[in-house]
Image: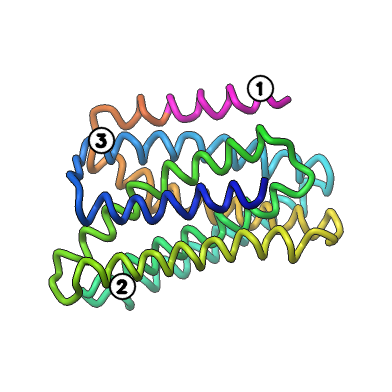
């Protein structure tokens, strides 16, 4: 299950980069997919990461961990926006990587003791968000002209490998950890993902497809709810 989830998530990042570099990139379609992924991620974070952690380890630990994740993500995201954007595209790549690491760690940790439905909800929403994010990022880097398309693709392939390693580390490295530690990490990752939705995902979706962004978000949320219900 872990291998399949990691392969799907990493392949989506690579395919997204190929899409942005060599294929047509319709802003409306991209925005719709991003919004749908955001809706799915909202429910996935609540139902698969936060709510079970509250039930097992209590409200205080869970809330503090969620808050810490949001603060860390927002702080580093601020540094990227204000100090690391240099016109080369590396700032955008750093933002995508910073977004992807907590998502993939959460995926690896969530698979521990989880059923297939929970894994599908979280992995599927990450896949949907990776495709347009990588497409837009790779296209922006290539348009700056200081790297060839193959060089840009190589950078995104390396990023996919890094994020895959994060998922494996989250799963293998923490398989024997106590529930409280796992729950704290799940909630920390959940807080980081929620912060990324607020600062990166939904603003992008609205900018590219503001007429249908709300509908797409709702579709993603309903799809995630349906998968969760089937696995309950």
Find disc 2 in the rendering and name its residue: 90
Q: Quadrant of residue 213?
A: top left
Q: CA distance from mark 1 to mark 3?
A: 28 Å
**Secondary structure mainly formed by the magenta segment:** helix
- Relative placement, left or right, of 190 versus 96 is right
Mark toward the start of the polypeptide (2 vs 1): 2
Name the one closer to the observer, 79 or 113: 113
- Relative placement, left or right, of 112 versus 47 is right
Mark toward the start of the polypeptide (1 vs 3): 3
Q: Residue at x 37, y 71 (%)?
A: 80
Find disc 3 in the rendering and name its residue: 29
The spot of residue 146 in percent (x, y) is 16, 76
Find disc 1 in the rendering and name its residue: 229
Residue 204 - label: none
Q: CA distance from mark 2 to mark 3?
A: 25 Å
Q: Secondary structure at mark 2?
A: helix
Q: Quadrant of residue 216?
A: top left
């Amino acid at each position: 299950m872990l291998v399949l989830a990691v392969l799907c998530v990493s392949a989506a990042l690579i395919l997204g980069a190929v899409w942005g570099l060599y294929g047509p990139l319709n802003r409306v379609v991209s925005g719709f997919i991003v919004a749908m992924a955001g809706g799915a991620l909202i429910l996935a974070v609540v139902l698969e990461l936060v709510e079970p952690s509250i039930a097992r380890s209590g409200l205080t630990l869970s809330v503090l961990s969620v808050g810490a994740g949001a603060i860390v993500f927002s702080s580093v995201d601020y540094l990227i926006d204000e100090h690391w954007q240099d016109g080369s595209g590396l700032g955008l790549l750093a933002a995508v990587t910073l977004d992807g690491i907590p998502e993939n760690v959460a995926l690896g940790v969530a698979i521990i003791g989880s059923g297939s439905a929970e894994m599908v909800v979280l992995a599927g929403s990450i896949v949907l968000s990776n495709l347009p994010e990588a497409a837009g990022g790779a296209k922006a880097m290539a348009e700056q002209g200081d790297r060839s398309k193959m060089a840009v693709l190589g950078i995104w392939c390396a990023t996919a490998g890094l994020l895959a390693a994060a998922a494996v580390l989250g799963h293998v490295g923490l398989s024997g950890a106590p529930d409280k530690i796992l729950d704290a990490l799940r909630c920390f990752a959940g807080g980081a993902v929620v912060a990324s939705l607020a600062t990166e995902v939904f603003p992008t979706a609205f900018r590219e497809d503001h007429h249908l962004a709300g509908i797409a978000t709702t579709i993603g949320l309903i799809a995630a709810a349906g998968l969760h219900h089937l696995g309950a």
